[in-house]
Image (cartoon, helix red, strand yellow):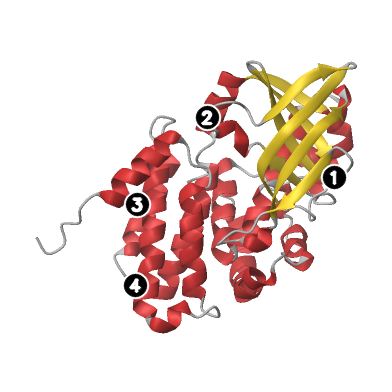
């Protein structure tokens, strides 16, 4: 890809290999991500990866963003996962024309402040779990956001609530208060990323905090177009497993899968993402099988990567991706036939 910034890629490689990967097991077992891990990413300038130079960011191309994201995920998925949530808040602050641009755009682009997101619930079928109703010239949020990562490490959370056929997006202070309460979730992988369920009890949202109100169908279209970005997570974990395993057919498969998703159209993205999930499970499982019984020790990288591959099967999954995952993971192997 001609628009790949090799200097940023080299910087990400060095950060991932020399700093993030050596401490990944310790972070995984810590129960909460050390702030020093996020400081490493900030000091490398990568909190500005998603922002333009105008706001103090790096102005990186999409291809460079994908490559850096992949490398950091292969260094420490817990660190990368918390950091990657920052992209949504940073972009929203820059793209809005309201007061939230002045309040947050520069601070998020430079890493002075850290952002998170609360919108995974929008993908759930049925009755919306978090609702917005007009109130006193602003809005009132009620319900729950069941999957919010980085709690305690972020300053602001870009939050989505449904109002009839629309989505109301607002930037809210990321802390518990009288009308927002958090409940820590315990996860089998990247638990140290501190994922919580947020409950909103008629939480008042000033109009000044709203970054946009968009039609729900427009959001679903926009989300489908953005599926490439978090494909960097399974690419990074699979690449790390393949590197630890040593030369194998997985190397060519990894290069092919990366090329495929980079070139995928919107219609092709779901199968490209599912192929990455399948590859990530196979690569990490191969590493476990190759290492042997000691791969199950909590001090072994193989078990950490294998657990992360399972997490990534459901992270960012749409109904289309799930359908492809099920087909890929349940097809009968022809080995030996």
Left or right of residue 72, residue 276 in this image: left
Label 2: how many Cα within 10 Å (few below 14, some 14–19, many 20+): few
Q: Residue 104: x, y in percent?
A: 84, 39
Label 1: how many Cα within 10 Å (few below 14, some 14–19, many 20+): many
Residue 174, can we see it? yes
Q: Nearer the viewer, mark 2 or mark 3?
A: 2
Please name whichever residue, 11 or 215, is drawn nearer the observer in this view of the structure.
Answer: 215
Residue indicated by mark 1: 107
In the picture shown, does residue 70 fall above or below 13?
A: above
Residue indicated by mark 3: 256
Please name whichever residue, 31 or 274, is drawn nearer the observer in this view of the structure.
Answer: 31
Local secondary structure at mark 3? helix
Residue indicated by mark 2: 125
Q: Name the residue at 75% across, 67% down.
A: 34
Please name whichever residue, 216 or 283, is drawn nearer the observer in this view of the structure.
Answer: 216
Local secondary structure at mark 2? loop
Decide which of tag 1 and tag 2 comes sooner along the chain.
Answer: 1
Decide which of tag 3 and tag 4 comes sooner along the chain.
Answer: 4
Q: Residue 4: x, y in percent?
A: 55, 48
Say which quarter of the image contains residue 266.
Answer: top left
Q: Name the residue at 65% across, 67% down.
A: 15
Decide which of tag 4 and tag 1 comes sooner along the chain.
Answer: 1
Decide which of tag 2 and tag 3 comes sooner along the chain.
Answer: 2
Say which quarter of the image contains residue 76.
Answer: bottom right
Residue indicated by mark 4: 247
* Residue sitting at the far left: 337
Decide which of tag 3 and tag 1 comes sooner along the chain.
Answer: 1
Say which quarter of the image contains residue 163.
Answer: top right
Decide which of tag 4 and tag 2 comes sooner along the chain.
Answer: 2
Label 4: how many Cα within 10 Å (few below 14, some 14–19, many 20+): few
């Amino acid at each position: 890809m001609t628009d790949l910034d090799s200097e940023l890629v080299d910087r990400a490689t060095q950060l991932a290999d020399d700093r993030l990967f050596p401490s990944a097991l310790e972070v995984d077992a810590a129960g909460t991500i050390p702030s020093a891990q996020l400081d490493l990413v900030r000091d490398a300038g990568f909190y500005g990866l998603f922002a333009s130079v105008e706001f103090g960011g790096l102005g990186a191309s999409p291809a460079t963003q994908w490559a850096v994201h992949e490398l950091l995920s292969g260094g420490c998925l817990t660190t990368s996962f918390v950091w990657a949530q920052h992209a949504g808040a940073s972009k929203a602050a820059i793209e809005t024309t309201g007061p939230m641009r002045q309040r947050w755009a520069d601070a998020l682009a430079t890493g002075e402040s850290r952002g998170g997101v609360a919108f995974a619930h929008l993908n759930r079928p049925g009755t919306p779990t978090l609702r917005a109703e007009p109130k006193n010239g602003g809005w009132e949020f009620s319900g729950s956001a069941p999957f919010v990562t980085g709690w305690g490490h972020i300053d602001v959370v870009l939050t989505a609530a449904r109002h009839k056929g629309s989505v109301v997006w607002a930037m809210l202070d990321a802390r518990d208060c009288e009308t927002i309460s958090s409940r820590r979730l315990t996860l089998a992988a990247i638990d140290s990323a501190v994922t919580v369920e947020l409950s909103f009890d008629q939480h008042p949202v000033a109009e000044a905090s709203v970054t946009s109100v968009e039609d729900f169908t427009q959001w679903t279209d926009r989300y489908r177009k953005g599926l490439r970005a978090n494909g960097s997570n399974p690419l990074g974990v699979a690449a790390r497993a393949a590197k630890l395993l040593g030369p194998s057919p997985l190397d060519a498969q990894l290069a092919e899968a990366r090329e495929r998703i980079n070139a995928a159209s919107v219609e092709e993205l779901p199968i490209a993402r599912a192929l990455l999930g399948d590859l990530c499970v196979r690569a990490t499982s191969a590493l476990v099988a190759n290492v042997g019984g000691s791969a199950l020790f909590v001090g072994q990288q193989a078990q950490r990567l294998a657990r992360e591959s399972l997490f990534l099967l459901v992270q960012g999954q749409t109904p289309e991706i799930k359908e492809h995952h099920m087909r890929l993971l349940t097809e009968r192997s022809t080995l030996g036939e």
